[in-house]
Image (spheres, coloured by chain):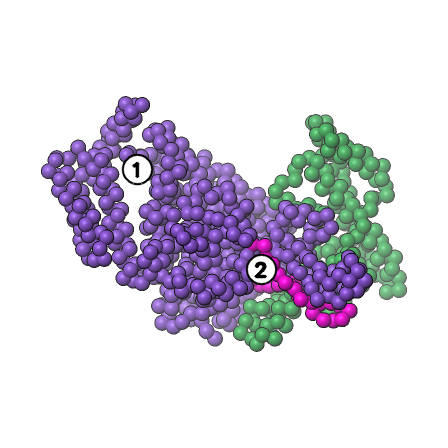
Chain colours: A green, B purple
Amino acid sequence: MDHFEVFGLPRRLAIDTAELQRKFYELSRRHHPDFHQTAPPEEQARALEASARLNAAYRALRDPILRVEYLVRLEEGRDTKEGATVKPKAPPELLEEMFEIQEALAEAKAGGLDGAGRAVLVAQRDRLTARLRDEEARLVGPLSQHWDASPPAARQRGLAAMKESLAIRAYLRTVIDDLTDALGENQEGYVTNRRH
Amino acid sequence: MSRIVGIDLGTTNSLVGYVDETTGLPRVIPDAEGRVLLPSVVSFTREGVLVGEAAKRLLVRRPATTIYSVKRLMGRGYEDIKEELCYLPFKVVPCDGIVKIQVEDREVTPPQVSAIVLKSLKERAEQHFGEPIEKAVITVPAYFNDSQRQATKDAGRIAGLDVVRIVNEPTAASLAYGLHRLKEGVIAVYDLGGGTFDISILRVKDGVFEVLATNGNTHLGGDDFDRAIVVWLLDDIRSKHGVYLGRDSEAMQELRLAAEAAKIRLSVDERAALTIPFDGFTYHREIARTELEELIGKLVDSTLGPCRVALADASLGSSDIDEVVLVGGSTRVPLLRRRVRELFGKTPHSQLNPDEVVALGAAVQAHILAGGITSMLLLDVTPLSLGIETLGGIVSVLIPRNTTIPTSAREMFTTSVDGQTIVDLHVVQGERELAKDCRSLARFELSGIDPMPAGMPKIEVTFLIDANGILQAQAKELRTGKAAAIEVRPTYGLTEAEVERMVEESFAYAEADVEARLLIETRNEADTVITHVERALRQGGELVSGDERESIRAALEELRRVRAADDREQIREKTTALNRATEHLAEVMMDAALKGALGSKRAAEIMESK
């Protein structure tokens, strides 16, 4: 059973999240182990499994970007985490700029940062963050809509476009993390994008 | 269905509660004297084990064998806690990954000490209901990792309890509030207890309590406030009286208790005075609330970072929070209330007693599990990311933090050498990229793999975090379909066999019987009075007449004579007599102390002796 099927939903990216939450609560009431504590062991095990499946499905579907990531994985027949990571790819129009940023990062690593150097890194990070937001908006907006609207036979191109967009997003997030590291703003408790 | 009680196993105090069937409301169970808080203190004496108030009274006199705040040691390794060992008067030693406490010639583990507290609560509940109690819900800090949760569960088993659920403290508190007071919306539960800090953000809707994010620090609490005060007092004493008391464990306990009392007073008053009689001098000092705030300001501020991370993880801003709830005794500190109000822009709730609210919530959860409540459902999360170590020591995350539990993740593994029949996995918990910076949970050994060329076997491992937040794992070889054997070696925990042994041993730590307990207490009381009187005679003997001194000495001798014998009545009688004989001297000394006469005299003596 895939995550869409858990909620009885068609394999589409447009999802009413308020309705999804309502269903999640309703199904949780049915499956959560708390309500099967007095049942025989086999039924408890079933409840545990159903509840874990429901929680995983809700997590994957409630966030529109995670939803795209899941859909891509599902369409490609990869349902474990292995091989799920998209290979980061630099945005084609920013190749030159990326080269400069990598140089600035290497310099920061080698010789520390002065005020001017910091300002440059901060400005670059701001620009990349804006670019990341644009990419995410494209992913959950036009690209998702396009995939939903395509007839099944024509979905391959849409899928490829979403994969490319995810790859660019992964790249941008890594570079933003590197910039944050270099600026020394990586506090305890801060979780890098790289890991999630 | 047998009864399930809810237990708050706290750093400082523990409680047990249940839901009253007739009113549907949760209640905490008092002991025979009407006290609901059981101090989480255990004292090992020759006559038997003391728990709670009785043990607490031995903190100063028997510092090496009286264990307190053991929750801070649960599921911990020696490396985690070695820095704070200098503040503990009892001896903690490393042992196979975990730590043990050395009590004279024997060693006990933190779960065994906690089990003694749990057993006492179990018996309290059994007295209350007049029936055996075998099942309990026990609360833990939300930010407790797998080892700390497992250690708590082990403690329950050693105490003879079937722990049907481990519940997070802030979520339990939200259930207690939720019964009547909470409106629907997003709430933040800020929980600062004696030793741990949690922040949980929840959405409450249609009877569902959905935790959106949680964060915290399992090593930050009121104990750290006390410690900051003690360190400051040590300095002050050194400059005023020329002695450093840091290595005197009795004096340190006196200071710790006085610091705690002053801190509590300063939550109500602007100033607090403390007077501690030490050997050779009486230390007197006033503390202003502003001074306390300066001492603990950094600690209070360090709770704000986790609050911000939790908000960010829930994708919320502080203005999205509808209500803020305060839990834990340390949230009585005014500075802390101010900081929380500033952060969330709201006056926090604290209508329910912050010491009791977690136990009340545990009782509600117990009632849900027993089938008594079906309108409420708690959906909690795992506080830390779960991952496995991959090539180069990098962590590959399988279950991200703040994932709703129960939850599972599947992962494929294979062999790297021809004919390999065993695969090792290292499971860690934490938010860092490198496995060595995360918390090692366990090493799994997958064995019984049929010899095949490298890369051919396909072993599917399912990691499941159950509703207790505890990891379980299963493995299956996909080609043959047969289950692979998994051996789990917990990094910071007890093995199954060790827990079994401790369950059997637990009778060795039986609580002293009532008679023995009363004798220990009476004798202890006598010792305290003897010490005080000896001290008083040394310091202020000349303030009263020679006759009076003589009659005090006589009463002292009388008490000394009967103290070692087993006649409790007689010890008590002579203690009362000695107390009475010293009343006048005590009054005279208190007057003198208030006038500062003793203090300056003491200073003069020090100058002379140099």
Q: Which of B144 and A176 is in front in this view?
A: B144
User: Which image quarter: residue B14?
Assistant: bottom left
- The residue type indicated by label 2 comes to Gly
Q: Is residue A140 left or right of residue B349?
A: right
User: Bounds of the magenta span?
Assistant: B463-492
Q: Quadrant of the C terminus of chain B?
A: top left
Identify the chain of the residue marked 1, using the numbered disc in the image: B
- The residue type indicated by label 1 comes to Phe
Name the spot of residue B3 as percent of width and height, x first. 45, 71
| Element type where label 2 sits in the image | loop
Q: Residue at x 62, y 56 (%)?
A: B442
Identify the chain of the residue marked 2, using the numbered disc in the image: B
Name the spot of residue B405 as percent of width and height, x first. 61, 61
Q: Tell me the residue that label 2 is attached to.
A: B469
How many labels, in total? 2
> Is residue B355 placed above or below B157 in the rendered structure?
above
Q: Is the magenta stretch mostly helix, strand or loop?
A: strand
Q: Tell me the residue that label 1 is attached to.
A: B278
User: Which image quarter: residue A41?
Assistant: bottom right
Name the spot of residue B545 as percent of width and height, x first. 12, 35
> Is residue A135 placed above or below A185 in the rendered structure?
below
Tell me if mark 2 has few (under 14), some (14-19) or many (20+) residues whose alpha carbon lies within 10 angstroms of its own: many
> Is residue B397 placed above or below A128 in the rendered structure?
below
Report whether residue A9 is seen.
no
Q: Which of B99 and B395 is in front in this view?
A: B99
Name the spot of residue B462 as percent of width and height, x first. 68, 64
